[in-house]
Amino acid sequence: MASPQRQSRIYAIREHLNAHVLMLKEELELFFDNPVGVAGHPDYFKSIEDKVCELAEYEGALEALDKHFKE
């Protein structure tokens, strides 16, 4: 049986990672829904690629947390 402190820490990091995922999804939605920024943003596709890679990183961290540190 996991201690309440352990469960609380796992919950806290899960919520922290989930918050990053939600923020990145929102940023990507803004990129995709507002194409007017393409002309004024020379690194438009690079920025999207960076955000997608960052999103994958956080989602991978969540998967690893769930796989190795189940509550």
Image: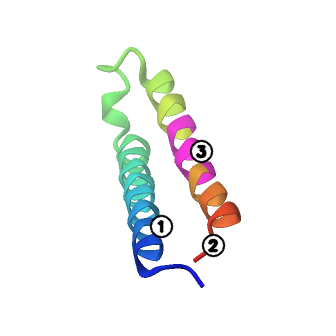
Query: Mark 2 Cα within 10 Å, few/some/many (few <14, many 20+)?
Result: few
Say left or right for 69 vs 5: right
Say left or right for 37 vs 45: left
In depth, the one of 38 and 46 nearer the eye is 46
**Residue kind at label 2, given as amino acid type:** Lys
- Residue matched to label 3: 56
Question: In terms of image quadrants, where is residue 65?
Answer: bottom right
Q: Above or below — where is 66 with respect to 58?
A: below
The residue located at (37%, 53%) in the rendering is 26
Q: Position of residue 41 (x, y in %)?
A: 33, 20
User: Which is closer to the viewer, label 2 or label 3?
Assistant: 2
**Residue kind at label 3, given as amino acid type:** Ala
The answer for how far apart the CA atoms under marks 1 and 3 are is 20 Å
- Residue matched to label 1: 10
Q: Using the image, tell me which numbered label, if any, was put on residue 41.
A: none
Q: Using the image, tell me which numbered label, if any, was put on residue 70.
A: 2
